[in-house]
Amino acid sequence: MDYTILIDNREQQNWLDESWKTAHVTLETGDYSIAQSSSLQSKYTDKDLNHFLCLERKKTVSELAQNLTKSAFKKEIERLANFKHKFLILEFSYTDVVNYPYNSSIPRSRWRKIRVRAPFILACLSGMMIHSNIQVIFAENRAGAIAIASEIIKRCIKILEKKENG
């Protein structure tokens, strides 16, 4: 069976190059998933994907911090928990979180107004791992995130192919 990597329409920076068979679609949850190429649609619910694989990407600590306070993101994490293979891949390091807002794009003059701090971010990430069994990966940078995501997708496709072939 042939598989296509699904990329959410709202995903602004595609991780995958032309060597991958991809389709830009509307995903209910996450930024990346996979589906059989023979059954491509323009919009997917989590049920359509059999809750198999979901990758959620965060580019910066600031983006993650903003998302953690939004109810829409909390609902997305709840849906993400239903997937068999679920990953939150971060294009930054653990140290970046601990040092936040240092080295962020937030002007120093606004730091006093920041309500989401490193301890809260780390507590939320720990909660995702413990309560929702979401694999949180600190990929250090974009290149690391791409390498990790590619490997996860390859391995998940092999699992699906093995299931098909008995």
Image: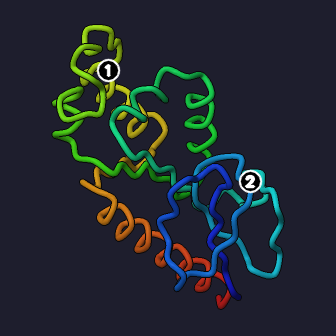
Q: Give the percent coordinates (x, y) of residue 121.
A: 33, 27
Residue type for callout 2: Thr
Helix, strand or loop under label 2: strand
Q: Quadrant of residue 106?
A: top left
Image quarter hosting the C terminus: bottom right
Count neighbours of disc 1 (C-alpha within 10 A) and say few if under 14, some if 14 to 19, many if 20 or more: few
Judge from the rendering whether residue 164 lies leftward or rightward of residue 122; answer left or right. right
Q: Is residue 126 above or below residue 150?
A: above
Q: How is the image coloured?
A: rainbow
Q: Position of residue 91 (x, y in %)?
A: 33, 51
Q: First in sequence: mark 2 or mark 1? A: 2
Residue 26 disc label:
2
Q: Is residue 90 above or below residue 158?
A: above
Identify the residue under disc 1. Answer: 120
Circles 2 and 1, Cβ within 8 Å, touching? The answer is: no
Q: Furthest residue to the top? A: 112
Q: Say the numbered circle drawn on residue 85.
A: none
Quadrant in which the N terminus is drawn: bottom right
Cα–Cα span, label 2 and label 1: 30 Å
Which quadrant of the figure has residue 18?
bottom right
Q: Residues within 10 Å of mark 2 (few under 14, many from 20)?
A: some
Q: Residue at x 55, y 22 (%)?
A: 70
Residue at point 82% right, 62% down?
42
* Depth order, front residue of 134/90: 90
* Residue 56 x %, y %: 51, 50
Q: Quadrant of residue 147?
A: bottom left
What amino acid is labelled 1 in the image?
Answer: Phe
- Left or right: residue 21 versus residue 59 is right
